Amino acid sequence: MDGRLRPPSPWASPLDSADFLAARSLGLEPMDQVIATGVYLPLWGGPGVSGEVQSTSELVRLGWRNTVERMKSAAREKGADGIVGVKIVRRRLPETLATEFFGYGTPVRGMRGPELWTTFEKPSGVKILRDHGYEPLSVVFGYCAWFQSTWNFKPNWDTGRLWASQEIPQASGAMRGAKERALGAIDEAARAAGAHGVVGMVVRSEFLTMHSEEAKAVVIGDGLVADFEAHGTAVRAVYGGGEAATGFVVPLHERR
Amino acid sequence: MPYVPGQEEGLPEAARRRLTTMRGGGGQKPLFTSDLSINEFVLVREAGFEPLGLVMGSSIYHIGFQWRSIYQNQELEVLTQAMYEARELAMTRMEEEADLLGADGVVGLRLEVTQYQWGAAMAEFMAIGTAIKHRGGGNYRTVDNKPFTSDLSGQDFWTLTKAGYRPVSLVMGTCVYHVAHQGLRQSLQQVGRNVEMANYTQALYDARELALSRMQAEAERQQADGIVGAQVKESSHGWDSHVIEYFAVGTAVTAVEDGASSITPTLTLSLNDPK
């Protein structure tokens, strides 16, 4: 579950040379990797009432929370102060309705905070943040599955919907509902961590219909499910900040 | 739906509450969110702006149908209109969120169109970016009193401001075009020969020109000096093989008085090979 079966040394790290250098310049010492995983089975088909599908939302949040906690627990056992380069993957296992969460990252010693800190950023990102007066606190996550039972996308010969271009307000509303719950959860988590902001947010959204097995696992009924997920790194402003290292270059090339 | 500054009609109550809290309302500390990378975050701050919040607008849109003659090159106005209006709806909702945050503008804006197998005539249009505000105040809004919008990255935004320009608005033009099928006689005449497909050439040229000219007209309305990062994207969005959309998009910019500064690039050798 958390990689404790592997021998303790020598350590291995996915950091490339620039990130390793950035880590060392921050006084961070990489300590192997931490891995956490968990497989979860959702409740089969709840009642199809429009609104947030609590059971699904809670299951995904639980999976995420457990994955982060397991990584943190493994990092603490190694004596780490933080985890950099966190990656968390959520995927449906083939031929099943089960969802797997798989997380990994590089625990580091140095930059001790009141609590073990986590970030999606690599050490070069942490270095730039520190040099400009910010420090990472924790990875934050928001998710919501929103069911919309009635919506009108099918051809309607009476209203001419087949021919006319127009918005489908119920579907737009479902996605907005899901987005608000997910982003609200991120705000809440960041505030709970004592953050001033969240950087590097990644947003993913999609619609599932009742034709898919995934959607059938969420609710029973005719309609669609808006699935919205967002995550990022909560950061805190540190008074004064540090000093930019000589020759440290902020590249001007493309955003990620 | 035309944008009216200060309008919040498209915002659900939950969004209004969340954004007000993010600004520090309801006795809460202000909190920013952003999809900027660390480099972008730092450079946007270096340019004198503070990120305020991730802003998003979306619209699920049913794209209508238009009859066309298979042997005629023609713009499909119904589809052009739908593709433009749906993007505009998403943009408007995003701008409403930015307005509520008290933003001067939105950077790193992405316009995404997603289609689903279950709804061939439907598409999800999404506009997403980071709302920012200048620390020193000043007017960075558009001539319509909207927050400025830009698809430039944080790096490009910093470079632009250092070069003495500022973004005015994301400008776009679209054209959905039907390319005529060739007749049997024409096809037979071409068998075994290297020939230019004149009707294809003309159709693709016309469609690109229409999209580009509409984008430029938007920039003129915004009283911009020029457009940077302009690109023309091509997609058929699952329509039949002779129907194609050209979507021209870029950031309209204007020179800032006394804003010009010299940037002296320094050559550096990266320790990493590009991947």
Image (cartoon, grey):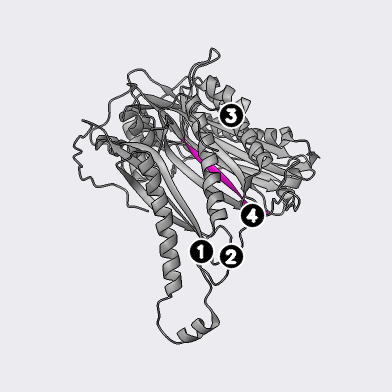
User: Of label 2 and label 4, which has the lower sequence position?
Assistant: 2
User: Of label 3 and label 2, which has the lower sequence position?
Assistant: 3
* Horizontal relation, residue B212 to residue A105: left or right: left
**Contact flag, marks 4 and 1 (Cβ < 8 Å):** no
Hey, what amino acid is under mark 4?
Ala
Camera-near label (3 vs 2) is 2
Q: Can you identify the residue that label 4 sits on?
A: B121
Please give the count of numbered marks on the rendered protein.
4
Q: Nearer the viewer, residue A203 or B152?
A: B152
User: Of label 3 and label 4, which has the lower sequence position?
Assistant: 3
User: Of label 4 and label 1, which has the lower sequence position?
Assistant: 1
User: Of label 1 and label 3, which has the lower sequence position?
Assistant: 3
Q: For mark 4, does the 10 Å Cα neighbourhood hold few (<14), some (14 to 19), or many (20 or more) residues?
A: many
Residue at x 60% of width, y 52% of height: B115
Between the residue at mark 3 and the residue at mark 2, the CA separation in whole angstroms equals 37 Å
Q: Can you identify the residue that label 2 sits on?
A: B68
In the rendered image, residue B220, in percent from the top left (x then y), is placed at 35, 43
Residue at x 72% of width, y 39% of height: A148
Between the residue at mark 3 and the residue at mark 4, the CA separation in whole angstroms equals 27 Å
Q: Can you identify the residue that label 1 sits on?
A: B74
Provide the secondary structure element on which disc 2 rests. loop
Q: Quadrant of the C terminus of chain A?
A: top left
Chain bearing tag 3 is: B
Q: Can you identify the residue that label 3 sits on?
A: B9
Camera-near label (2 vs 4) is 2
Between the residue at mark 2 and the residue at mark 1, the CA separation in whole angstroms equals 8 Å
Provide the secondary structure element on which disc 1 rests. strand
